[in-house]
Image: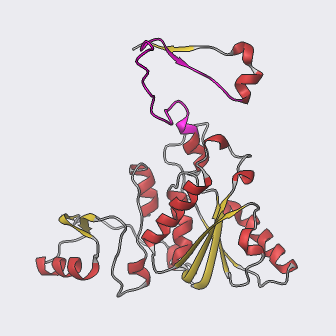
Amino acid sequence: NLSFQAAKHCQNLDVRVLLSGLKYKNKLIYTEREVELVIFDEKYASDEVQKFLSTKLVNISKDYKILTCANIAAEPISADLEQKNDKVYQHTVLGGTFDRLHLAHKLLLSEAALRSNSKITVGVTEENMIKSKILWELIEPLETRMSTVENFLKDICPELNISVVSIEDPFGPTQHDPTIDLLVVSKETIRGGEKVNEVRKSKGLPLLDLVAVDLIDEPAQNPHEEKKISSNTQRMRLLGTLLKPVKQNLNLPKRPYVIGLTGKFIYRNFSNTVELAYNE
């Protein structure tokens, strides 16, 4: 599984599976950024390589490089994958916080894009819906999250009509848009998908098909983190790191380095607040 291997070996690498070549056999492959390295899984003749580069890749760097990874054993296709429902829909939808877009988000978005032949709508939660999450104060601004989702979808499947909207309740556009016919959820949120259909039924709207995606286990989980790859874990790992560059003040000595602590926990435990000093 490509996503699991990416999570295991290169979580810091932004891995994107381009879907246009899978969905539209004769389509050109377009990317927002220039392609600098092309990797082939077996050795091809030089003229075959050049034909692929000239007829398929639109945005390729003048200084591109070729890498061949031959003699790598392929994993057998599982029975579950072979029997997977591959039905395609006109209009797919999904929702979430999409904080610091990670591999699990990409799986959900890619599933929705792969199953749509026309339009995909993504609901991104507003601030009123995120305050119950772990370290919600560190969640990216709404505009950043929406922009990141849109950029990702335009990169993997630009042929689709992409609509990224903000939502202030769990139902978003599903509670009034009759054109939606598929809702993509994670296996952990399947009950939320069923609730969406209950609301649509009460309003006389057609029920949505549900597709539940099994998310990826966190390969480097510690006892305080979630089992699955999640934004909660990513925010926990931000603790103790600089969110913004330190502006050097030449009028202040370099040490001691004073760190100010703030937040409700510190306020409640004011008598226990300590001053941390860092000596270079």
* Residue 165: x %, y % from top left: 64, 67
Q: Residue furthest left?
A: 46
Q: Is residue 119 above or below residue 168?
A: below
The figure's colour scheme reads: secondary structure
Q: Nearer the viewer, residue 176 or 191?
A: 176
Residue 274: give x, y in percent of width and height.
Answer: 63, 14
Location of the N terminus (image quadrant)? bottom left
Q: In the rendered image, which quarter is residue 145 located in? A: bottom right
Q: Residue 139: percent from the left, percent from the top?
A: 61, 46
- Please report the residue visible at 22 percent of the width from the left and 71 percent of the height from the top: 42
Counting from the top left corner in percent of width and height, residue 198 is at: 83, 74
User: Is residue 227 shown to the viewer in this render?
Assistant: no
Above or below for 269 versus 122: above
* Left or right of residue 96: residue 144: left
Task: Examine the rendering and report whether any part of residue 154 can be seen.
Answer: yes
The question of residue 131 being in magenta is answered with no
Main SS class of the magenta portion in the image: loop
On screen, 224 above or below 114?
A: above
Q: Is residue 249 above or below residue 65?
A: above
For the residue pair 249 and 7, the one nearer the viewer reads as 249
30 or 11, nearer to the observer: 30
Stretch of the chain drawn in magenta: 236-263
Residue at x 51%, y 59% (from the top left corner):
148
Q: Quadrant of the C terminus?
A: top left
Residue at left offset 58%, top offset 50%? 230
Q: Is residue 133 left or right of residue 223?
A: right
Q: Quadrant of residue 40?
A: bottom left
Extreme residue toward the right, this view: 202
